[in-house]
Every structure is written in structure tokens, then in C-alpha cells.
Image (cartoon, grey):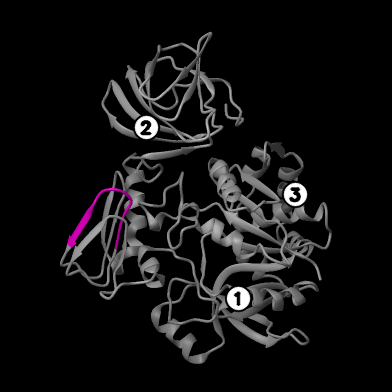
Amino acid sequence: MSTIVPVILSGGSGTRLWPMSRTLYPKQLQSLYSDRSMLVETAARVSGEGFGEPIIICNGEHRFIIAEQMLKAGLNPRSIVLEPVGRNTAPAAAVAAMMLIESDPDALMLLMPSDHLISKPDAFLAACAQAQIAANEHALVTFGIVPSAPETGFGYIRQGEPLVGYDGCYQVQNFVEKPDLATAKGYLDEGGYFWNSGIFLFKAQNYLDELGRSHPEMIRLCQQAVDKGQRDMDFFRLDDKSFHDIVGNSIDYAVMEKTDHAAVVPVDMGWDDVGSWSALWAVGEKDVDQNILVGDVVTHDVKNSYVRSSGQLVASIGMKDTIIVATDDVVLVADKDRAQDVKEVVAELQNQGRDEHVVHKRVYRPWGWYQCMDMESHFQVKQLSIKPGGILSLQSHQHRSEHWVVVSGAASVVRGDEDIKLEVNQSIYIPAGVKHRLENKGQVDLRIIEVQTGSYLGEDDIERFEDIYGRH
């Protein structure tokens, strides 16, 4: 039987899990319910026998974080595909299918989001085995989640007649939009309705055939984006213009609601899309007061709440049914029943031209990370952490000078024509306009305190001359 190739979609920003989830470091890259990121959990779930190496489709801004997380987890992606812009799931699936059939015309692909929780992985794998038999023929299979409540936040799938000869598989009678509460209760009472998981299994060629019938222009532009795409180190960049020209659409609308070959495998696999802080509270392990407490947290008379700190101490008194999430620069406090409204706060931040919805205080780079510690109009203090082997680009700044102090590890510095090695407690001054580079040739992380002074301190005041990571 054909090997299943996982195709993992990692393009979302997870605004309802702000302030932890932000555009440049979204929820799928974070460890929110285990000690591994949601992306790694997803990839590991389908890394066993019967599965091939995954294709990961992501935003180019996340590529180095994803590659490093996969490497640390011992997972080897078949390809990390970079989308120049988000165009929903139908084009993403199409480019993955096109890349697969180049080497295997009969390739089976398991399309799945990177940020879903599946607490019963054995049930999921059993459902995949059932779906695989039908998908090897002509079925485009989706997975219907056995509902545990009249949920209004999910779309539903209505089960049709059994697929003869394919145990556990049924025709899809129809897809249903997110219902109101009364309608959702009716679905549960009637039976035969399942939550739409957004996970699919089908032959790559069968998907392209179905998509081509209703969206031939999307097929043409996706193929062009692949044909004109370029390898960039360990990544594959889709052609920018071709992909921008695509009119985005979801698999549900573009294919599944139009095809005569849609099938569903119902499964109870402990699934949740973990789309809000209240959802994360619902699926997590709670203490005797029904609280989930993460990080440096002290509570008194707090019940049914989710309290999380990624740094400073958070103390809470007399709170019930409350969400409290503290990061280095933001504190969110919300009624647990209003957790979905976090996206409204994110929209307001965007309207105000702020950046707390985009970037954390700690910003990850392929060489490590930096974090702003203090800033005024004419100076900024940062902490830099450069991992072993990490090299910053050879660069210069027009408007600022930099002072570096080594607080841990050893630094190899290029300053103009000089090559300098700095140990702990040693420092160096980099004048504005001078080419410079920082490198960690050691075996432990290098920590630097950087003090910038000048008339302009923006991250765009940088001219790169050489960069091992292919940045410009």
C-alpha cells in the first residue's frame, strides 16, 4: 500500500491566542500544551511506519525557526515550502500535490493544519488506515470529529450512505456552515453530524483533477509558482508573482463541496483546534481548583481560570472564570467566556499602528535571538544570544553606533579589517558606517549586551554585504 506523505500547513498567525501568538512567532511554533511546539507535535504524530517525510508549507518569516525545531526533534522534512503570501488551503494543497507527483504519480497526501491537538493519536492513526483504502481509489477523504457538545465555532459534516467495501468510510451528504446553538443541538440529537476537522487524505493527482475542473486558473498559477520556484538553502521558494496572482480559496469550497468523491471517516481522537485561551483551558490538566497555572504564578481564591506568565511573577486574587496571560510586554486579562474576542484587541492594535500583535520582545533569528531591554529616542539596550555556529551578517549601519559587552561565551568579531576575539567581561565599540560581523565559534551560547546610540535605531538601518542565511 502507498506511503502517506504528510503535508503540514503552517501559515496561520493564531490571533485568538495573543499575546503569546503573534505574526512573527505564531501559536504553532510555541509549546502551549506540551514541552514541544504544536508543529513538532503534529509532525511527530505522523512520523512512524507507513508515513513519508513531511512537506511543510509556511510563511518565509518562520522558515529558520521551523527548520531548527524539526532538526532538534530529529524530524527531516521532505521539503519546507515558502509561500510569498497566504492564499488559503486550496492553493497550498495544490503546490504540494504538484511537487509530490513529480516523483510519484500515485502519491497519497495527508493534509493537516500544524496547530491542532489530537490527544488520542492511536485513534487518529487507525482512522488514517481506514481512509487510506478509500483514498487509494478515487475518494477524497476528510475526517469528521465525533462531537462532544453542540459547538457553534466549527463547521459540520453530514454523513451520507456507507461507502461499499470501505469499512468506516461514508459518503459526504453535505457540508454545513457554523450553526447557531439551537441548530447545533439539533445536529447532536439527530446524529450523523460531525465537526469538520480540516484534515484530508487523498491521492495528489485526484485532488488536482478535481480542483482543475472548477478552478483551472488556480491550477495554472500554482503550477507556474512551482515551475518558477527556486531552491534557497534547505527551502523551496514559490514564485512570488505567480502565487500573488492566485485568488485564494479553501479546500472545502474549492473542491470538497463540488466533488462527487467526497468521503468522511468519523473518529473520536481527542481533537481540538485550540483556537482560544478558553479552549486551551478546556483541554489542559487542571488543579483541584480547576485552574491551569503556567510559569511564575501565585494565586489566592482563584477558580476555573487560566493564568500564564512567561516571565514576571503574576499574582491573582479572587478571580473566577478568568484568563490572565503575561508576556514581557503585555498583560491580557479576560473573562473566559469572552476569550474569542481577543482577536478584536488584535484588530485594534493594528488600527493604532502598534506592533505588539506582530512581534515579541524576544525576536528569533537564524543565528539565535535578540531582546530589547530598554529604549529611548537616542539609545537602545539589547541582549543577543548567538547559538554555537551562529554568524550574524557582515553589515554596517548608517545612523547608529554599537557597543558590545560579552557576558557569556566567547565572541569572534570582524570590525573593518580587524579580527578580534572577546572573552567574558571584554567589550568593543563599532562606529557607525563600519563593516562588522559577530560570530560564535564556541560550543556554548554566546550572550552579548548591545548598546546602540544614534539618531535612528530602526531594524531597517542595516546594509548587508554577506549573509550565510541568504538574507538581503
Q: Are marks 3 and 2 in contact (CB under 8 Å)?
A: no
Q: Which residue, given by chain and number where applicable, does mark 3 sit on?
A: 220
**x, y percentage for residue 467?**
59, 25
Residue 354: name its quadrant. Answer: top left
**Mark 1 is on which residue type?**
Asp
Question: Residue 279 location in percent, x, y?
Answer: 39, 68
Pair 3/1: label in front: 1
What segment is highlighted magenta in the picture?
307-316
Q: Which residue is mark 2?
A: 383
Give the Cα separation between the discs numbered 3 and 2.
47 Å
User: Residue sitting at 73 percent across and 67 percent down?
Assistant: 50
> Is residue 143 at all visible to an observer of this figure?
yes
Q: Is residue 386 above or below residue 182?
A: above
**In the image: residue 18, left or right of residue 258:** left
Give me the C-alpha separation between circle 3 and circle 1: 38 Å
Q: Predominant secondary structure in magenta?
A: strand
Q: Which mark is first along the chain, 2 or 1? A: 1
Which residue occupies 36% across, 44% down?
Answer: 350
Q: Is residue 245 visible?
A: no
The image shows residue 456 at horizontal and vertical percentages of: 35, 20
Q: Earlier in the sequence, mark 3 or mark 2?
A: 3
Q: Which residue is mark 1?
A: 122
Q: Residue at x 51, y 72 (%)?
A: 119
Q: Is residue 184 left or right of residue 39?
A: left
* Quarter occupied by the N terminus: bottom right
In magenta stretch: residue 135: no
